[in-house]
Amino acid sequence: MSSGDRTAALAGVTAATLLVVAVVGLFGLGIVATDVTSAQSSDGDAPPELGGGEKVNTTAVEVSLVDDTGLLMSTIETDDFLLSDGELSHIVRRPDGTNASVTLVLAAPISASELTIGIASDSDISNLNGTQIRTGGDAQTVTVAEMDGVPPRVLGTDVSDAIGSPAELEFRFDERLSDIAVTISGPENTTLGIDDFDNPVSNRYVARYTPPESGEYTVSLTSVTDRAGNTGNVSLSRQIQADRTDPEAVIGIDFGASRGLNVTFDASQSAGSELTYLWDFGDGTTTTGEQVSHEFTPEEHTISLTVRDGFGNTDQDTVDLNLTGGLDSSEDVDRDNGTADPVVIVNRDTSGEARSSLVSVTGALASEKLKIGTISDSEASLVSRNAISLDRLSVTPTVDTSFSLALSGLGAGDISDAATDDNVEVGGFTVLTDLEENEVSTAEFIFSIDARRLDVLDISPSDVALRRESDGAWTTHKTTVLVEDGERYQFAAETPGFSRFAVIGTNGTAPTDGSGGTDNSNDTSDGGDDTKTPAIEVTDAALDRTEIAPGDSVEITARLENTGDGAGTFRAGLERDGAVVDTREAEVGPGESATVRFSQTITENGTVSFGVNGTDAGTVTVAPAGDGDTNGTTPDDELNVTEGAFTVANVTLNQSSIGTGDAVRVDGEVMNEEDDEADYIAELEVDGEVVDTFEVPAVPGGASVPVTFTRTFNESGTYNISISGTASEEQLDVGSGGGLFSFLGFLPLGLVWTALGYIGIPMVFFYLVLKAVAFYLGY
């Protein structure tokens, strides 16, 4: 070996020696460091502990993990925590000395007042020495109070009209309330609060509202607040009708039911709703009821009737009876109350089927409609023959008068001359009277037909018409369906007088009132110029919602348009699954439109279709709250986002380089810059395009809330990541993997240092020694 070679070799050995010394020094430092960790492990056997917890907002709580040695942050994961209510969306970890602060972000606010947080049995939370947190029966828990962040939810509502008594307003919720706001608009505008409601059963709130005057009122539930202070804005409205007309007491005597000194009184002709009746027979005896009987002594008696409606309004009627010889006729009846109120006496045929009735009217007033007959379904009809019954009638005389009516039922064979080749006879009735033709302004008949009768004759209810014989000629009059309950149909028709009447089934082409046109439509003229004709139809119908919970109500609206040149009245019929369940009347002027509203409460699950006079309004789905959006009202959990109040900062990626098909976590902080609590929706953006959103409700003024997104990338490339316009400092590289040592990311940091100290450094040392020897020997 030459001198130069030896010199070079010596230099190589010297360099190798120095390198070995340096490596040995590093190795020693690794051993020292490892010994310190080991010493800490041996001296710090206490496991990490779950410290306190506090509320950040309704969707976030902050808990502390305490350890004297130092927590291994990478071991703290979302699945390590258990919640007593709600669902955990993600966590945000922050070191705090040897401890850690962990923000638990809920997927949504919870309705429970308290939230208890525990540690999962398979948790791997560890400190730097590898000591794990206690789990199972030894696990700790913390409880955070005042976490209820869900406003009350409306389960159902029911309102009644104020007809004869105050309207009853009922609302049902899923929890108890501390406040409620209900606005009432109409002839009077007012607002009801929690003090106006009774709370008879847990979550049910009922108020009675007395409108100051008649008219239509809109009842709107606008907001509710639970006992935790959560307020939900609601948009739920119902219409009610109010009738504040004072009642009118009218005493009637049923001569057919009266015998001698036993007299039967009838108050059914009294006007008003929700009436109660108090009778005073003048002999110290009183009783209540719409129809009553009393046994008198043979002398003169004064009988009084006091009616009271639900508003507390009263009226009284009085009659004198001369019963010295028993009750023989209406001559024994004398009204001494100084008024001109009429007395109506109905004598029904009580033998078998009521084919006839006699009616006696005393003191009828000109231009005032007088109602005769049944008021409720519990009363007998005036006349009944086969499947047709005359339920009631009304007369408007042109003069002050007293008169009598003789009513008789007719079979189909008795009216065969009323039908043409295209019509079918159903039945009829006759009305004989001592009134002159010019003493009757109008007469209205309310009659019913058994549904089975129409089915047998194959007649649609809309094709039923009432015809009147006058001077040997038959005239068809407008006939409207009032009730359709599956067992019977009730109709109404108006005529200019009395005579013989026929109920027929038409083909829709029968002339009406001799005009030569049809009158099976709903619209009627206002009685003005005969050359002006209304043409009213339903042009649109709609539901206010398509999904509700059982017990909730749906509102149906229909738009009416009059394309004719005359005003008219239209009767709109609400159809539920094809059957008419309610009707409304509306006056519509020529060239004008009107809106009618219906409300239906549905208690059973399923689908229900609605229509108005054949115009489809839509279908509503009825399902429990958990099966979908059921309120149909403005959702209580809908965010009221205030964009300008928030800023986003500290946007970071948990790793800047991943492989295709891997996921990256993007963290950031949302800051409410305003003083008031507000809602926000954070947006995850990739290269400027929004790919995901995160709702952040109820952020207190001046507070910041962490947000976290997780996104999987299936295509390689470099991406710019941002949250609501705030970009992360690093770009995301997809396709190059996670770096040389990314495979070590799953290992605890203490284990990595131990492996490097005991294995990695000695291997490097021996490699360098062998390299130096080989170099010295010339290899």
Image (spheres, helix red, strand yellow):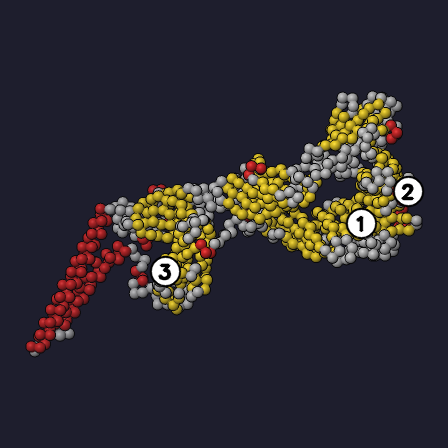
Structural distance between the alpha carbons of marks 1 and 2: 25 Å
Eye-nearest disc, 3 or 2? 2
Residue 546, which numbered label?
Answer: none
Disc with the residue nearer the chain's start (3 vs 1): 1
* Mark 3 residue type: Leu
Quadrant where the C terminus is found in the figure? bottom left
Residue 479, which numbered label?
Answer: 1
The residue that label 3 is drawn on is: 653
| Vertical placement of residue 592 versus 247, above or below | below
How many C-alpha atoms fall within 10 Å of the one at disc 3: few (<14), some, or many (≥20)?
many
In this rendering, position of residue 675 left or right of residue 153: left
The x, y position of residue 65, in whole percent, is: 32, 47
* Mark 2 residue type: Glu
Residue 436, which numbered label?
Answer: 2
User: Furthest-left residue in view?
Assistant: 3
Q: Secondary structure at mark 3?
A: strand
Could you say which quadrant of the image residue 161 lies in?
top right
Could you say which quadrant of the image residue 616 lies in?
bottom right
Structural distance between the alpha carbons of marks 3 and 1: 77 Å
The x, y position of residue 37, in whole percent, is: 22, 52
Quadrant where the N terminus is found in the figure? bottom left
- Residue drawn at point x = 72 percent, y = 32 percent: 314
- Residue drawn at point x = 81 percent, y = 56 percent: 532
Structural distance between the alpha carbons of marks 3 and 2: 98 Å
Q: Secondary structure at mark 1?
A: strand
Along the viewing direction, whichever of 169 and 773 lies nearer the viewer: 169
